[in-house]
Amino acid sequence: MVDEAPISTAAEAAQHELILAFGRLQGAANRLEHVLGRAIEVECGISHLMYEVLLILGRSGEPGLPMGAIAREQVLSTGGVTRLVDRMEAAGLVERAADPGDRRGRLVRLTELGEQTVVRASRVHVENIKRYFVEPLPAAHREQFAEDLRILSHAAKELLPRPS
Amino acid sequence: MVDEAPISTAAEAAQHELILAFGRLQGAANRLEHVLGRAIEVECGISHLMYEVLLILGRSGEPGLPMGAIAREQVLSTGGVTRLVDRMEAAGLVERAADPGDRRGRLVRLTELGEQTVVRASRVHVENIKRYFVEPLPAAHREQFAEDLRILSHAAKELLPRPS
DNA sequence: GGGAAATATCTGACAAGTCAGATACTGTTG
DNA sequence: CAACAGTATCTGACTTGTCAGATATTTCCC
């Protein structure tokens, strides 16, 4: 994973080990999202992005989460979250409640339907993760790969904490 | 990376190891794309997606690549590629030539400006990859992580080869 | 306390992809 | 060799996200 030659042609850029590695990360993530997201859509009628938001809300529990927090968890603009939550609310998956401690804010939380939907979607999702994400990797690598993802994910989160 | 309990609440789904691992893959990929893509945009005025297409074309060399091949490399619909290449052509980065062997097809290839741009963007990109993607990982893990990405990327590619 | 700066959310205008159907050529087959 | 299924690309209608600016509160100081 080292390549110190200076890049001076398109062909060199295209073969560069680091560029390739990063491209593979993006490619694998995109394709897996495409496939697993489609499965969730077919099974539960919600997009992968909505599913991710349901998960985030499931993690945050009763009180609910402000819109901005959702924007930061997923990499979304606050305007994007407004519209996404609009649609999720229209679909009956979540509800917006007033934030008692801050009248500007709204707390978003799961409805009963949202809770059921995330459970149902998750069962499908886990099977697909096993099949398409875990199984291709050599068993001896899985533990370390998961750890590295944790590290990377954590580092990347620090990278865009607030200054959105 | 194992978790065999059946999922029956949103909170359980949200804590599930496999779901978390997959979420971290997506989260890390999204955030890194956001940050590194922005850098390319600022430096060269092209989106990360355009950059990826330039790389693909750099890899394919002289003859050029049909639109459909680009669609398969990136996970894009053919309609999406038409429009993306429209914009890239308008920006002078690529050109469409007739395919001598198939009058339906068009071969897309880099222009001189496209070539220069991909080289310039790649230099920035490599530095950012080192900083944000390589450095956070323990040095002893990097080799294996790169290999696992290769495996995953390859497996995911097989998953959506043609049946788009 | 009073007002400036910061923060949370929403909205109009826009950008960029998807999807399904149109169009134009290719290749196969009876 | 004509018909037909298959393939490559393009297009109109639409979905969904971004960006920048508006609005309502809150926080921080003087």
Image (cartoon, coloured by chain):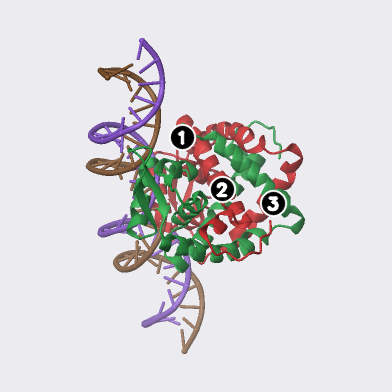
Chain colours: A green, B red, C brown, D purple
**Circle 3 residue:** B148
Q: Chain of mark 2?
A: A
- Label 3: which secondary element: helix
**Rounded to the nearest whole Å, what is the CA distance between mark 2 and mark 1?**
17 Å
Asked if labels 2 and 1 share a chain, the reply is no
| Residue name at image x 69 percent, y 47 percent | A147
Quarter of the image for residue A110 reads bottom left
- Judge whether D30 appears above or below A48 on screen: above
The disc labelled 3 sits on which kind of residue? Asp
**Circle 2 residue:** A26
Determine if residue A14 is in view: no
Task: Tell me where residue A66 appears, x and y as whole percent.
Answer: 41, 43
The disc labelled 1 sits on which kind of residue? Glu
Asked if labels 1 and 3 share a chain, the reply is yes
Front in this rendered view, residue B88 or B33: B33
Front in this rendered view, residue A136 or B138: B138
Mark found first going from the N terminus, 1 or 3: 1
Front in this rendered view, residue B111 or B86: B86
**Circle 1 residue:** B41
Instruction: Kindly check if marks 3 and 2 are in contact, taking CB atoms under 8 A apart as contact.
Output: no
Q: Chain of mark 3?
A: B
